[in-house]
């Protein structure tokens, strides 16, 4: 299988499953026009995150790493009525695009965009999240995961993006991003606060994966 085939299957699936509408496409177009890196979750991954939010009946969602707001919009669409999403972004240019996207999607009232470094913002948040999506600087993954567990309610779902990175998790152990994610796996191995699983993923973003954890 080639990356082209993975991407073609992604397109086929999302075409049939639906949900990747003009609002989400406009968010990606806005991000691209502003020069943001093309590293948002794929449409199919967004639909998966949305589905997880609906399955868990999420009233409060936390995202670390907003970029242009694409995954935040998928997640926010999965909130129960009256639910809220907090998302944290360090790069002012990324946050500006995200703010525009939230307004254009008419979801700005349900989303709080926190501008700053996640390690500074996280201690200011109230616990009780139903779902946490960790997708920022991989170097801090262990700290983010530890904080996510503490901010999550029992039974909550924690998802960590980019845990495979085209196999670099094994082939590039000296890459700082890989070091961050491997440190997370070492910590998770002995973390009795959570039950864990993981998905290896292929698709429009090539080969990657997500860590899934349920807070006990
Ligand atoms: N979740 C997004 C993609 C996020 S890309 C989506 O799928 O649509 C990772 C983002 O994390 C980038 O925008 C980057 O600026 C941000 N980031 C990096 N380090 C950060 C930090 N220390 N605190 C908060 N955000 C950070
Ligand atoms: C990178 C970051 C991401 O969150 C992602 O989904 C893909 C790539 C990166 O920093 O390279
Ligand atoms: Mg990611």
Image (spheres, helix red, strand yellow):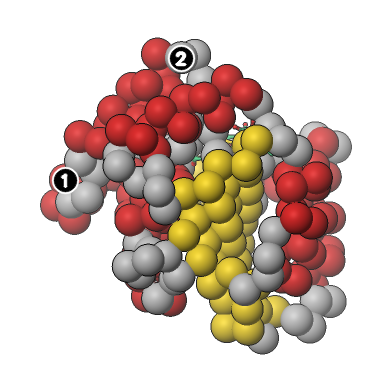
Residue 162 shows in the view = no
Q: Residue drawn 36% across and 35% down?
A: 103
**From the Cβ of disc 1, is ligand 1 less than 8 Å away?**
no
Q: Secondary structure at mark 1?
A: helix
Q: Secondary structure at mark 2?
A: loop
Give residue 12's position: percent from left, percent from top.
19, 45
**Vertical arrangement, residue 176 with respect to residue 185, above or below:** above
Give residue 125's position: percent from left, percent from top.
70, 59
Q: Which residue is mark 2?
A: 34
Front residue of 112 and 174: 112
Horizontally, residue 23 falls left or right of residue 131, namely: left
| Res 132 quadrant in image | bottom right
| Res 175 quadrant in image | top right
Question: Which circle marks residue 15 in the picture?
Answer: 1
Q: Residue drawn 18% across and 51% down?
A: 18
**Vertical arrangement, residue 116 with respect to residue 215, above or below:** above
Instruction: Count the labels in the image.
Output: 2
Q: State which quarter of the image contains the N terminus.
A: top left
Horizontally, residue 91 falls left or right of residue 70, namely: right
Give residue 110's position: percent from left, percent from top.
42, 53
Horizontally, residue 152 falls left or right of residue 173, namely: left
Residue 34 shows in the view = yes
Spatial separation of the CA atoms under disc 1 and disc 2: 26 Å
Front residue of 204 and 114: 114
| Circle 2 residues within 10 Å: few <14, some 14–19, many ≥20 | some
Ligand 1 falls in which quarter?
A: top right
Front residue of 167 and 135: 135
Q: State which quarter of the image contains the C terminus.
A: bottom right
Q: Residue drawn 43% across and 23% down?
A: 31
| Circle 1 residues within 10 Å: few <14, some 14–19, many ≥20 | some
Q: Residue pushed farthest left?
A: 16
């Amino acid at each position: 299988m080639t990356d082209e085939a993975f991407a073609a299957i992604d397109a086929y699936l999302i075409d049939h499953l639906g949900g990747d509408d003009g609002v989400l496409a406009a968010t990606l177009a806005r991000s691209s026009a502003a020069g943001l890196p093309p590293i948002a979750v794929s449409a199919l991954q967004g639909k998966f995150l949305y589905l997880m939010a609906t399955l868990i009946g999420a009233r409060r969602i936390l995202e670390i790493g907003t970029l242009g707001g694409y995954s935040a919009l998928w997640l926010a669409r999965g909130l129960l009525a009256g639910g809220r999403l907090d998302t944290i972004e360090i790069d002012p240019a990324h946050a500006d695009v995200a703010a525009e996207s939230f307004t254009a999607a008419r979801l700005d009232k349900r989303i709080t965009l926190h501008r700053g470094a996640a390690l500074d913002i996280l201690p200011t948040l109230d616990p009780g999240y139903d779902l946490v999506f960790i997708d920022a600087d991989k170097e801090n993954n262990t700290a983010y995961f530890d904080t996510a567990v503490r901010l999550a309610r029992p039974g909550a779902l924690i998802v960590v993006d980019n845990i495979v990175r085209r196999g670099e998790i094994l082939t590039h152990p000296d890459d700082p991003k890989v070091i961050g994610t491997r440190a997370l796996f070492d910590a998770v191995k002995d973390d009795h606060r959570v039950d864990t699983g993981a998905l290896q993923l292929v698709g429009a973003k090539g080969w990657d994966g997500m860590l899934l954890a349920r807070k006990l």
